[in-house]
Amino acid sequence: MYRRTEFSTLQSCGVPNLSKFRQAPELVALGSVIYRRRVELGFSQEKLALIAEIERSHVGRVERGDNNVTVLVLVKLAKALNMSVEDLMREAQL
């Protein structure tokens, strides 16, 4: 059922997964820091989303570097992870 193209597909409906083609290195670095801290705290994406008051799917996209995170969301995530925005940015080397 999967239609093969130069891109991997998300589902059998043939929707291409373009995330690796649009990820800025800075967003990937920031997402990696958020992911590592979430795992360190033993949080699921759902738990982090509930604490930060954002959608769970948005947490996943931020962690993968698919979304250019807004300042407001960054502040919410930092607080939920018991970190400052400055610490998040420093760890991501931004």
Image (tube, rainbow, N blue to C red):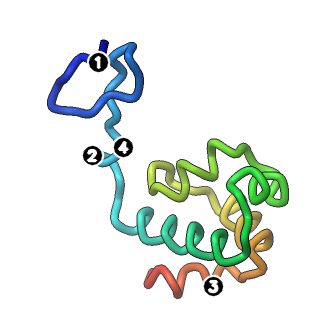
Identify residue for label 2. 21
Checking the image for residue 86, the label placed there is: 3
The x, y position of residue 25, in whole percent, is: 34, 66
Which numbered disc flags the more N-terminal residue, 4 or 3?
Answer: 4
Identify residue for label 4. 19
Above or below, 51 against 85 in this view is above
Between residues 76 and 2, which one lies in front from this camera angle?
Answer: 2
Q: Can you say which quadrant of the picture contains the N terminus?
A: top left
Q: Residues within 10 Å of mark 1 (few under 14, many from 20)?
A: few
The x, y position of residue 70, in whole percent, is: 62, 57
Which numbered disc flags the more N-terminal residue, 4 or 1?
Answer: 1
- For marks 4 and 3, give the one nearer the viewer: 4
Left or right placement of residue 36 versus residue 81 in this view: left
Q: Are marks 4 and 2 in contact (CB under 8 Å)?
A: yes
Residue sitting at x 73%, y 75%: 41
Q: Are marks 1 and 3 in contact (CB under 8 Å)?
A: no
Above or below, 47 against 85 in this view is above
Give the Cα distance between marks 2 and 1.
Answer: 20 Å
